[in-house]
Amino acid sequence: MNEEKSNSESGLSAQRSNSVAVRQRSGLIVIAVILALALIALGVVYYLQHRTMSEIVEQMEFEKEQLTEEYEDLALQFDGYRNLDIQNDSLQEQLSREQQRVQNLLEELRITKATSARRIAELKKELTTLRAVMVDYVRQIDSLNTTNTRLTEENNRYRQLNNTITRENNEIKSQNTQLQEVVNRASMLELTSCKVTTLNKRDRKTPILSQVVKLQVDYEIAKNVTCDPGLKTIYLRLIDPNGELLQNDTTQVCLFEGSEIGYSSSQTFEYEREAMAGVLYFKLANTPQQGYYNADFIVDGNLIGSYPFEIHK
C-alpha cells in the first residue's frame, strides 16, 4: 500500500517536471522570435535612416553646387562692371571691394563641406545681400551712364554751337576785313596821270641822251571825298632798266605796307579832297642808260600809281 502510494507520487513528480520543461522551451522560443523580430526591425530602421541620410547628403551636395554656380555668376557680373570705364572713383573702389568679397566667399564655399548646413545657409544669405548690392550698383552705373550720355550730348551741342558761332564770327571778321579793305582802298589817293621829261643842266627839255642830267615828273591826283584831308607826302621811286632804284641818298626811306623802303624823291602837299597836280624832280648822278624805266608813287604807305616810261637816244 505504501509502495503504490510512493509510485504514484513519483509519477506525479515526473509529470510536473515534464510540464516545466515544456513551458521553458516555449518561453525560449518566444524570446528567440521576439529577438529575431527586434533585429529585423532594427535592420529596417537602419536601412531607412541610411537611405534618408544619403538622400539628404545628396541634396546638400546639389545645393552647394548650385550655390557655387550662383556665386561664380555674380563674380562674373562684378568683373564685367569692374572693367567698365566708370567716371566715378568712389563707385569703382566700392565695386572692387565687393568683387573681392564675392571671390573670398566663393573660395570659402568651395572648401566648405556640403554637410555644414549652417554655414551653407549663411552663405545663401550672404548671396542674397550681395545680389541686392549688385542691383544698387547697376542702378548707380545706369544713372551715371545716363548722366554722362546727357552731358556728352549737351557738350556736343555746345561744341557745335560754338563752332557755328566761331564760323559766323570768322565770316563777320572776313567781311569786316573786306569792308575795311574796300574803305581803305576808297580812302586811298589815286594817281590819274604821269609824265616824265628829260632835262639838261639848264633845266630845259632835251631829247639828247648825253645831255640829260635831271628828270621832271609831272603827276595828277584824283578827287577823293573819303580820304582824310591835310598834309601828305608823296614819295617817288624811279626804277632803271636793270631793276635798280635810282637814289642819291641811301638814308631816304619811306613806309610801305608796314616796311621801310628807299625812295628817289619826295614832296609834301596839302590835300583838300580835290583833284590836284604836282611836280617832282630827280637829279641823275650819271648819264642815264636808254631803256624802259618805272615810276612808282607812294602816299600814306600805299602804292597809288605805277607808270612805265622810256628814255632813248
Image (cartoon, rainbow, N blue to C red):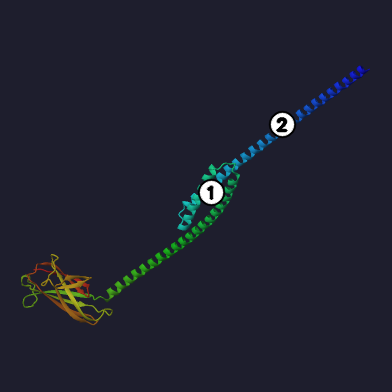
Q: Which mark is residue 74?
A: 1
Q: Which mark is residue 103?
A: none
Q: Is residue 47 left or right of residue 2?
A: left
| Residue shown at 85% from the left, 24% from the top | 16
65 over 95 or under it: above or below: above
187 over 73 or under it: above or below: below
Residue 36 spot, x, y in % from top left? 74, 29
| Residue shown at 18% from the left, 76% from the top | 234
Residue 252, picture quadrant: bottom left
Looking at the image, is mark 2 or mark 1 earlier in the sequence? 2
307 over 118 or under it: above or below: below
In terms of secondary structure, where does tag 1 sit?
helix
Report the front residue among 12 and 82: 12
> Dot 1 surroundings within 10 Å: few (below 14), some, or many (20 or more)?
many
Residue 44, picture quadrant: top right
The answer to whether any part of residue 87 appears in the image is no
